[in-house]
Image: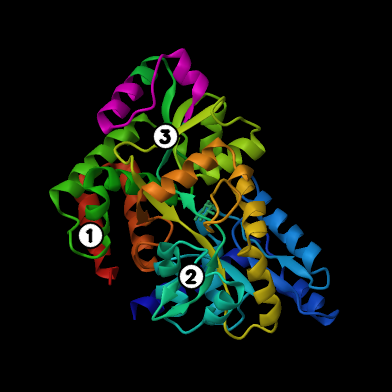
Amino acid sequence: MKKGLILSFLLVFAMMLSACGGGNSTSSSESEGAKEQGKEKLEIFSWWTGAGEEDGLKALIKLFEEKYPDIPVENAAVAGGAGTNAKAVLASRMQGNDPPATFQVHGGAELNDSWVAAGKMESLNELYQEQGWMDKFPEELIRMVSKDGHIYSVPVNIHRGNVLWYNKKVFEENGLQPPKTFDEFFKVADQLKAKGITPLALGDKEPWTATHIFETVLLGVLGPEGYQKLWAKEISFDDPKVKEAAEIFKKMLSYINEDHSSRNWQDASQLVGNGEAAMNIMGDWAKGYFVNDLKLKVNEDFGYAPTPNTEGNFVVITDTFGLPKGVKNPDDVKKFLSVLGSVEGQDTFNPLKGSIPARIDADVSKYDQYGKDTIEDFQSSKLVPSLAHGSAAPEGFVTKVNQAVNIFVTQKDVNQFIDSLKNAAAELK
Ligand code: GAL
């Protein structure tokens, strides 16, 4: 019933989007035309468009086209960070039995509770065997893309969510060190504020960015076990620890830029890049943006550290691609997946995307110092799934949390926020 409601909402939203030309996916009449001209196009659906997002995808497509020049590719990306618009468009297409050939989906709940549970995905066990992948991806990752003994997608990367980025010059000029604890964070923030520098950049035009910060605070306060217990309904949202996290989050929000609601994540990262703000909390796609788009240098112009109190923990975000049931070109899709899952594919995509390879045997020398450090951290850290990016809990819950966080950012009413989170918990399994 609830699922039905969410899906109809997404459907209406998707129709509105296409009516006002949202996103930049190819119109259906164009793709119909392409189909008539001959071979079925390999439609790759994602939300990787524009600054910081599309370089890796374009390079991967280029590599695929070099290997399979006869397979026409259509890059059907729909703009909007974290799939803000793409997920709604995808939902309507899946509902209408018109799936893209392959689509971006996060491992964990987003894949398993939606598309796999609805019987919309093909099992990829054979492809994994054929490609010899079973021991090439970390077990944790294979678990995130599996249900009931079947593997349903191929991870192209691992992004880290709990990263604090900071402007090196601003920190150096003010004699500051990246904060390791919340107390240190607030001390640093006060010093910056006194100098007229925005301590923390936020761009929550798309509300997931604020949820992204909040989940790192939850992790910092509850620790990895407590954080996981929240999604398993073993810790309630009115637990004193959650309240403490909400209070800390509230305090952090008093250090953000005033125009946060008119910026997206790139615009917020730009504030840090150009020194108007000192720090932001964002996944490491921000590194792709700093390096590829702002032309900044790792450890010279910007630095990175785990978000306060989360050293030794790693919020995992894995972008994966699978094979929907009913596509006309499953063999071509498998060819694409085999390139995406190869060492070459991963080492082409990830140095540009800001993520680390999902494979354990990738060529570390292809990665910058941030990438090298993150590859090591992934191996030595406690791994937890991201809520904001759909891995920790079902989409219905994430949507409600985003709404609650969005209201909290302006109203800052902790009790009301806790109530909304408690209500949202009805969506947890
Ligand atoms: C995440 C996704 C990343 C990046 C980010 C911003 O959900 O996993 O690859 O694209 O959104 O759009």
C-alpha span from label 2 to label 3: 36 Å
Q: Which mark is residue 15?
A: none
- Write the start and end of the magenta stretch as one range: 166-190
**Mark 2 vs mark 1: which is more N-terminal?**
2
Mark 1: give few (<14), some (14-19) or many (20+) Cα within 10 Å.
Answer: few
Q: Which mark is residue 229?
A: 1
Q: Nearer the viewer, residue 247 or 221?
A: 221
Residue type beneath disc 1: Lys
Q: Secondary structure at mark 1?
A: helix
Residue that numbered label 2 is attached to: 10
Determine the image quadrant of residue 90: bottom right
**Mark 2 vs mark 3: which is more N-terminal?**
2
Residue 413 seen anywhere in this rendered image of the structure: no
Residue type beneath disc 3: Ala
Position of 164 compared to 335: left or right? left
Residue 284 location in percent, x, y? 50, 44
User: In the rendered image of this protein, does residue 258 appear above or below residue 389?
Assistant: above
Mark 3: give few (<14), some (14-19) or many (20+) Cα within 10 Å.
Answer: some
Q: Residue at x 36, y 29 (%)?
A: 255
Q: Which mark is residue 305?
A: 3
Q: Secondary structure at mark 3?
A: strand
